[in-house]
Amino acid sequence: MRYVSLGRVPAKRHVQFRDPDSSANGNAPLLVEEVMGFEGFSGNESILYHLFSPCRVKEVGEFTPIELEEWVPETHVHRLTHTMGTEAFGDAVLGRRVLQYNGDVEIAICVPEREADYFYRDGEGDEVIFVHEGSGVVETIFGTLPYRKHDYVVIPRGTTYRFRFDEPQRWLTFYTPGEIETPNRYRNRYGQLLEHAPFSQRDFHPPAELVTHRDRAEHDVKVRVRGGYQDYVLDYHPLDVVGWDGYVYPYTFNIHDFEPKAGRLHQPPPAHQTFQGPNFVICSFCPRMLDWDPMAVALPYHHSNVQSEEVMYYVDGDYAARKGVEIGSFTLHPSGLPHGPQPGTVEKSLGVKETSELAVMCDTFRPLKLTTLARDLDDPSYAYSWYEDPVGT
């Protein structure tokens, strides 16, 4: 990401910097500098200037382990998961209900029934929230981040934040202990996005406004650390930043700003890649023109996920390669099994010039585990959707 600065920062790092708006008797107090960086001091970083020490806590609350209840199916098959019927549950953090996971990524749905009444910080991983439905703002230590329908909201670890809703929400969420980045092949050696990338820096939106909170009321903060949630009570507002600058901050990217690629013949899934994480990628399948060769087969060819698992979440439009797949459904095509268009769909697609599909895909390069929620929402008939009765039987 590019360099951004909001609020007031001193001309040099690690120097005295005072807050004139908090002066008492003519004495402006020193601000507290915080360096938030990745890979020790070797990766991207931002520097924030706080009214209070970010280490300051009034009370240490409970630690609650995160427990994922695994479902181990008796069969290894392709799976279809229907989620649109799920009722609103929990808040913007604890309402995230994991369906698939491994050591690299957790994939969840969230239909929150309410906003969280606390602030949240993921202390051990990056997050991506794809907003299927809803809009609002994310209040963060980096400032206020507006979001809208079909935005990817990318929140780096260490960011204290709270969602504020304008309307009902439905999200697809990703958590990773690694970093969320744009693909390496889209960037030059300086980090700038290249001309052939399917988006530009103009499509990524950092916080719009920095609001410095100075009140001294008590505020609850929940932090994800060591596989659980640790609660704290502060005697000041956690969004007390006067200014910051750097390369680490939350941002939004709307899926409709992804520029899909088309070709004379079918383009493979890497053409749709949007983000990368450790041992997984996130791709955006968007409305686009289809292959223009008169002999082209526009639908994906059959392929074997020998070393990867493919999860597809259906957002809108018509996905021609799949029958019986509804908006808000997941398909899981696990490693070791070939998959491709279902019977009849290839013939039906011949001559079609465009597609209206809108979907988010996650390919992982290590096997995924399933939760009991995935079991409860599983459609076992999907495994047989390629089968056709032999003629005459």
Image: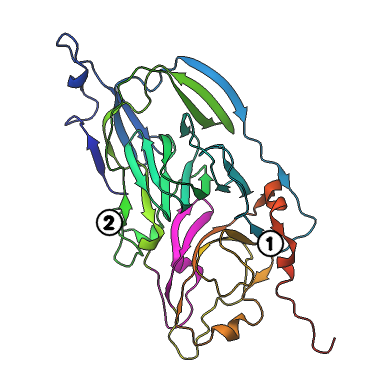
Q: Image quadrant of residue 202? A: bottom left
Q: CA distance from mark 2 to mark 1?
A: 38 Å
Which residue bears the numbered disc 1?
79
Q: Decide: few, some or many residues near mark 1? Use Cα within 10 Å; few <14, some 14-19, many ≥20.
A: many
Q: How is the image coloured?
A: rainbow
* Residue type, mark 2 in image: Arg
* Res. 260 visible in picture: yes
User: Dot 2 lies on which element?
Assistant: helix
- Left-right relation of 64 to 270: right
- The residue drawn where x is 48% and y is 29% is 117
- Label located before the other in sequence (2 or 1): 1
Q: Is residue 142 above or below residue 233?
A: below
Which residue bears the numbered disc 2?
202
Q: Decide: few, some or many residues near mark 2? Use Cα within 10 Å; few <14, some 14-19, many ≥20.
A: few
* Res. 106 visible in picture: no
Q: Position of residue 104 (x, y in %)?
A: 56, 47
Q: Position of residue 3 (x, y in %)?
A: 26, 45
Quarter occupied by the C terminus: bottom right
- Left-right relation of 224 to 166: right
Residue at the extreme top of the image, as rendered: 25
- The residue drawn where x is 44% and y is 67% is 286
* Dot label at residue 244: none
Tell me which segment is drawn in magenta.
260-289
**Pick the front one: 86 or 379:** 86
